[in-house]
Amino acid sequence: MKIRLLRVAAVCALLATMGIVQAAGNIEAGKKKAASCNTCHGEDGQGINPTPPLAGLTEEYFTRQMNAYKTGKRENAMMEAFARPLSDKDLADMAAYYAALPKPCGDGGAPAPTTTGTGEVIGDIDAGKRKAAKGGASSCNGCHGLHGRGDPLNPRIAGLATGYFIHEMNDYKTGAREHLMMQVVVQDLNEKDMADLAAYFASLR
C-alpha cells in the first residue's frame, strides 16, 4: 500500500506540471453545435443512462477527451465518428458551453442496476462507499470529491451507469484509455472492487 501511495503521489506531481493552452470558446455557439449531443447525453448535458453527463465538465477535460476520440486514442465507434469532423474552434465552443452548465446535483436517488451488464458480479453499495474513501488523498474521493461530485480538475462520477463505470475502469487497467493517475489507481482493483465502486457511484444522484 505504501508503494502504491508513493506511485500515486509521483503521478500527481507530474500531472500538476502539465499545463494545456486552450483557445477561448463561445458559449452560445457551443450550445448550437452541441444540439446533436442531446440525443445521447440529455438536454443540457445532464446525462441519460448509460451515457455520462457532460454538464459542468471543465473545458480542458472535455477538449482532451474529444481529441482522444478524434485520434482514436480513446475508442468508441460512435464518438470517434462524431468527433472527427469537429475543428479546434468547434471543440472550444462546445467545451465552453458545457463548462458553463451546472453539474447534475443531488444524492441518494434510487440505485441504478448493480451488475456488470452480464450479471456475473453484483456490486455492494456499502462496500463501494468504503472503497471509494480508502487511501485518503489518493482515493476516489480524494480526486473526484465527496459523493463523486467532481472538482475543477476531475469529472463528476456520481450517477454513472454501472456498465459504463466498469467499462472505463477496465479500459484504464488495460491501457485502452490513457491517464497516468487512473492507470496507476486501477491496477490494484479486481472485478469485485470495480463492481462495488460502480454500485456506490451509480446510487448517487
Image (cartoon, helix red, strand yellow):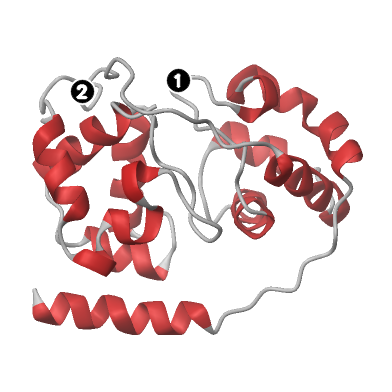
Amino acid carrying mark 1 in the image: Asn
Q: Which mark is residue 114?
A: 2
Kindly identify the residue that appears in the image at 26 percent across and 67 percent down.
Answer: 138
Q: Is residue 13 above or below residue 103?
A: below
Kindly identify the residue that appears in the image at 63 percent across and 36 percent down.
Answer: 102
Q: Which residue is mark 1?
A: 49
Name the foreground residue: 76 vs 65.
65
Residue 142's spot in the image, x, y percent?
32, 61
Residue density around tag 1, few if under 14, some if 14–19, many if 20 or more, within 10 Å = some
SS for tag 1? loop
Residue 23 figure quarter:
bottom right
Amino acid carrying mark 2 in the image: Thr
Cα separation, mark 2 vs mark 1, equals 13 Å
Residue 162 at least partly seen: no
| Quarter containing the N terminus | bottom left
Residue 171's spot in the image, x, y percent?
35, 50
SS for tag 2? loop
Mark 2 or mark 1: whose residue is earlier in sequence: 1
Q: Which mark is residue 166?
A: none
Residue 167 at least partly seen: yes
Residue 11 figure quarter:
bottom left
Kindly identify the residue that appears in the image at 15 percent across and 54 percent down.
Answer: 189
On the rendered structure, is 28 left or right of 99? right
On the rendered structure, is 22 left or right of 181? right
Name the foreground residue: 162 vs 80.
162
Residue 68's spot in the image, x, y percent?
60, 55
| Quarter containing the C terminus | top left
